[in-house]
Amino acid sequence: MEYLLETKDITKRFGGLTAVDKVSIGVRQGEVLAVLGDNGAGKSTLIKMISGVYRPDEGEIFIGGKKADISSPMDALAAGIETIYQDLALAENLDVGANIFLGRERMKRRLGLFHVLDDAAMGSEAKKVLDRLDIHIPSLRSTIRTLSGGQRQAVAISRSIYWDAKVLIMDEPTAALGIAEQRKVLSLVKTLKDQGIGVIIISHQMYDVFEVADRLAVMRRGVKVGERLVSETTPDEVVGLIVGAETVGKKR
Amino acid sequence: METTARPGPSEKAAAAGGFGRGLASFLGGRWVIIFLVLETVYFCLKAPGFANLNSAQILLFYGTQVFLLAVGELFVVVTGGIDLSVGYILGFASIIFIKLVGWLSAAGMAPLLVTLLGVAGALLVGLIPGLINGALVAYLNVPPFIATFSMLGVCHGVSELIINGVYAMGLPQFAANFGSGRLLYVVPGGPTSLFNRPNVERGATVFQIGPNIVLAAIVVIAIFAFVLSRSKFGRHLYAIGGNVDAALRSGIPVKRRLVQVYALSSFLASLAGIAYAFMYVSGKPDAGASLLLDSIAAVMIGGASMFGGSGTVIRTMVGALIIAVLEQGLRMSGTPTFNTYILVGAILVLAVIMERYMPQTRK
C-alpha cells in the first residue's frame, strides 16, 4: 500500500550541526509508525519539518504520493497533517467545544444583523467527535483546567480528528500521564488506527511502542539507523539500535 | 475510553467537607456581590441622604469615566496585558474634542454638526495612542507595562503642548445641556418632558430620571459586554490570555488581535474623555489621571486574573460600583476623599487574596 505521508532524504542543518541527515520515513493509512531515539537524536526536528515548523534544507515530502510544499504550520494543517505537541496547546480557561473550534469558531446569525458564537452547536459537534472516538467527558461545559491529563490528551486528539486529520503526529503522548491514563490514550491510538488514520508517535516508552505501533524507525545522531516491523523485532534489539550497541546497516 | 472528571477547585473544597470549606466555596464566587450589597446597606444607614434615587444617579454620573475605562482595561487584561495609559488618553481626547469643536464653531458650522464631527474626530485621534501601544506590544515585543507607561507620558506631554497652559473650555449650549441633563423630567401632578427641564418655579419638586451621559455609557458598555462574551473576537482574546501558543497554533491572528484590543481600550478611554468634556464643558490633560487606579482595581476586584484568560464585563462593573459606592458614601458621610484611595487599595488586596484562597469555577 502506498504511503499516506512520506519523506525522502530530508535534511535539516542548524549552522554546522546536521540535526536530521537524509531521513526517509513513511506512514500508511491505518498504520502506526513509532519514531524512537535518544535525546538529541533528531526526532523533534524531523517532526517539525513534517508539521511545517521548519523547512527542510534538502529532500522532499510527499502526501498521498504527490510532492507537497509545506512551508508553514498552516500548510501542514491544510494538507491534513495534525500535530499534537506535548503541551497539547489547549486553552485551559475555555471549555471542550471552544477548544475544538479554536480559531475556527462556529457562528450563528442573530436578528439577521450580526454573528454570535454558536456554543450549543460547537458543544454538540464536540460531543459527536468524542463519541466517535469513544471518549467520555462528564461535562463538556467544564473548562479544560478541570480535566485530567488523559482527558486533555483526548480533547487534543478529538480536535485533530474533527478537522479531518489524515496523518496525526503525537509527540510523547503518554509522557505526563499516570499508568491508567496511559492505557486509555494507547487504546485511543488504536481507535484512530481502526478509523484509517495514519499515526506517527514519538516516544521513549518501549512499552507504548510495542503496544500500539506496527512499524518503528530508530534515529541516532540525526540519522535513521534502522526500521523494523514491530512483529519482527524485540525490545532488546530496539534498545541496541537506539544506543548504537549493535552495528546495523543503514537503510536509506 | 472511560474517564472520570477530576473535581474542579470548588468541588474539591466542598468535598473536603466542613463548614469553613463550604463557606469558602460559597463565598468564592459571590463575595464581590455580597460586599457590594453590604457596603451599600452600610452607607444607606451611615450617610445621610445616601439612600435616595438622586444620590444613586449622581453616583453613576460621576462613575461614568471609571465604568468606561474599566471595560477597556478588562479587554486588555483578558489577553494578559495591561494598559496604563488610559487615564491620560482620556485627558488627551477631552482636549482634542473641545479644541475640534472650538475650531469648527469658529468656521461657522451649525452646533449639532460641530458636536457630531467633534465626537467623530476625537474618537479617531483617540485611536492613535492605542494603535501605537498595540503595535509596540504585538510587533516589537515591548512588554505592555512599558509600552503603555511610555504612552501615558507621551499623551500627558502632547496634551500639555496642545493646551499650552490654558484648559480647553466651551461647548455649544445644547451639548453642555445634554452633558449635565437627564432623559426624563417628571413634575408630580404636572407635565412630563424628555431632555428639557420644564419651566417650574424654583424650589418646586421635579423628579429627574436617567442622566443622559450614564444612559449613553450603559449602551456602550452593554455592546462591549456582548462583544467580549459572544463574538469571535472576544473568544480569541480569552484564548490568547489562556494559552498564547494554543491561540497561535489554532491560526488565531494573535498580533492583529493585540493591536485591536489596545485600540479598543484607547477608544473607550477616548469615549470617557468625550463624556468628561460633555459633563464639565472642559478638557484637561490630567482629567483622568486619578482614574487609572480605580479602573484597574475594578477589573481586579471583579475577579479577572492579571495573567489573562478570565474576567467578565458584568463582574468588572460590580467591581467599579464597589469603588463608586465607597467614594460617594465616604463623601456623604463627611470623610475626606483621600481615605478612598487607601480603602480602594485595601479592597484590591482583599480581592486578590479572596481570589487565591476562595477558588471558584468560572470562565
Image (cartoon, rainbow, N blue to C red):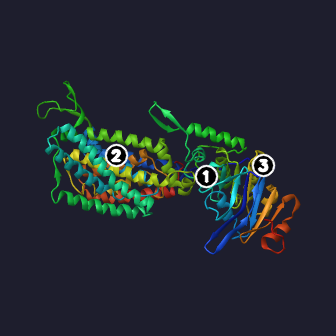
C-alpha distance separating marks 2 and 3:
65 Å
Residue A30 has which mark?
3
| Residues tagged by mark 2 and mark 1 found on one chain of the structure | no
Dot 3 alpha-carbon crowd within 10 angstroms: few under 14, some 14 to 19, many 20 or more: many
Dot 2 alpha-carbon crowd within 10 angstroms: few under 14, some 14 to 19, many 20 or more: some
Residue type beneath disc 2:
Thr
Q: Which chain hosts label 3?
A: A
C-alpha distance separating marks 3 and 1:
22 Å
Compare residues B193 and A160 and report the one nearer the observer: A160
Q: Residue furthest right?
A: A232
Give residue A145's position: percent from left, percent from top.
59, 53
Compare residues B348 and A126 and report the one nearer the observer: A126
Disc 2 designates what residue?
Answer: B40
Residue type beneath disc 1:
Asp
Identity of the residue drawn at 41% across and 51% down: B260
Mark positioned earlier in the residue sequence (3 or 1): 3
Left or right of B49, for residue A121: right
Residue type beneath disc 3:
Gly
Evaluate if marks 2 and 1 touch, with contact meaning CB atoms under 8 Å apart.
no
Evaluate if marks 3 and 1 touch, with contact meaning CB atoms under 8 Å apart.
no
Q: Which chain hosts label 2?
A: B
Element type where label 2 sits in the image: helix
Residue A75 has which mark?
1
